Image (cartoon, rainbow, N blue to C red):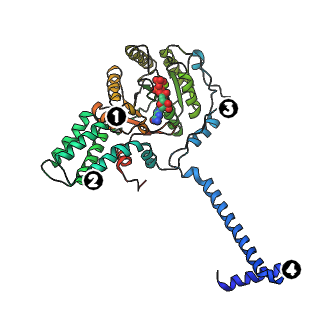
Amino acid sequence: MNESLLNRILEALQELLARFGVAEASRPMGALVALYLVVTLLVLFFVLLVWKLSKDKKPSQEVAPTAEQEDVQVESAEEEPPVPVEVAEAEMPLPTEPEPVAVEEAPAVTGVSVLSRMRSGLGKTRDSLVGRLDNLFQGKAGFSQELIDELEEILITSDFGMATTMTLIDSLQTRFGGTSAAANKVYAALKEEIATLLRQAGSDEVVEPDTTPQVVMMVGVNGVGKTTTIGKLASRAKSEGKSVLLGAGDTFRAAAADQLEVWSERAGVDIVRHKEGGDPAAVAFDAVKAAVARKVDLLLLDTAGRLHTKANLMEELKKVRRVLARELDGAPHQTLLVVDATTGQNALAQARLFKEAVEVDGIVLTKLDGTAKGGIVAAISSDLQIPVLYIGIGEQIDDLRPFNPDLFVEALFGDGNDA
Ligand SMILES: Nc1nc2c(ncn2[C@@H]2O[C@H](COP(=O)(O)OP(=O)(O)OP(=O)(O)O)[C@@H](O)[C@H]2O)c(=O)[nH]1
Ligand SMILES: [Mg+2]
């Protein structure tokens, strides 16, 4: 604003003040105060306007469907009251009367990119494993036996497991043995090797069957995150426009079906459940019948994680599989083994056990946010030759990610600038 314009505004204000009978001596100061007030009000108005506009735009800017959006769907699209469905009712079409659903507190809404959410979910591993690797490679001039020895220790203590650690070390020895290659070159090669290992058992070749309903059975020992993962998967599938049904096949643990029902409400999908202590194979039977009758796209079947003995558990899982296969051709189309990343090498042992007893098509590795030893992903991928299909990086409904080896490596080792 040029000086003469400012003077003219001030003069006009002084004239206005004169009309209101303000003494001449006070008019210059009065005009300044009035101008200051007007400008302040205009700035405030402008700030409010910008804030309001950005708030209205926010949902469409987010990368993934947010928890808030999921919850809206629960309220508007819920078609079945979340009450226990008895055997006979399970085969019937759904009642259509909507019922308000008590949905628990909305999970955190994130406007951040997929990569930065992954980065924060893997924060513990970044700080520990990657922090140690950074220190190692920054502190060494070049390739040496000492570097290899220290690297071996870091990998083993970060749950890469002996076999995978040896594979990585051997490939570095082959590439750089007898040279004094720069440490940063060796580090880059290590990251590449880790990415290759992860890709080898990656999800690229997994083709989802195109028949519906697709029956997915969730197995794993108690506490690993089966039920939670079902809730997250249901929510994902629903946001992709699929119709989903849950089967409460864990009849062993008290409140297991209640827990699944809470997830069904959160995700806004239907559930088939029996009374506690019932036969899980009967739940499977009803759930698959209901899925066919209702023409849903996806049936997610929960199972018990603990029975009186491990042999019992495996026998029960086999029986459930037989029932599913008898009722629907090809079912279960996918058996996902859920393992808890924080249990380290134990997770590997469990995975071997389940792999022997039931056919396992893919792994869901949960609680990666809770471990500093993310090397377990590489150990599972390379030791078991079963693809890691999803990783859990938190307890919220949108904290399940399809496992993408390249994104994973970027989230771990990248500098985050491209997030
Ligand atoms: N931090 C974190 N917690 C998780 C994740 N997945 C599951 N959990 C938590 O792990 C606990 C056990 O999860 P459940 O889903 O009940 O496990 P489950 O395998 O169904 O257990 P059983 O029904 O006893 O066999 C819950 O407190 C979940 O919130 C994850 O990715 N990250
Ligand atoms: Mg459970």
Q: Secondary structure at mark 3?
A: loop
**First along the sequence among labels 1 and 4:** 4
**First along the sequence among labels 4 and 2:** 4
User: Which numbered dot is residue 387?
Assistant: 1
User: Which residue does the numbered mark 4 point to in the structure image?
Assistant: 19
The residues tagged by marks 1 and 4 sit, at their Cα atoms, a distance apart of 83 Å
Q: Secondary structure at mark 4?
A: helix
Residue 205 occupies which quadrant of the picture? top left
Give the amino acid at mark 3: Pro
Q: Rate crowding at label 2 as few (under 14), some (14 to 19) or many (20 or more) other CA atoms within 10 Å.
A: few
Q: Residue furthest left?
A: 178
Residue 298 locus on image (x, y percent): 49, 30
Residue 100 locus on image (x, y percent): 67, 32
Q: Are marks 4 and 2 in contact (CB under 8 Å)?
A: no
Q: Quadrant of the N terminus?
A: bottom right
User: Which numbered dot is residue 100?
Assistant: 3
The residues tagged by marks 4 and 2 sit, at their Cα atoms, a distance apart of 76 Å
User: Which residue does the numbered mark 2 point to in the structure image?
Assistant: 138
Give the amino acid at mark 4: Arg
Q: Rate crowding at label 4 as few (under 14), some (14 to 19) or many (20 or more) other CA atoms within 10 Å.
A: few
The residues tagged by marks 4 and 3 sit, at their Cα atoms, a distance apart of 63 Å
What residue sits 66% from the left and 65% below the top? Answer: 46
User: As drawn, is 108 to the left or to the right of 100?
Assistant: left
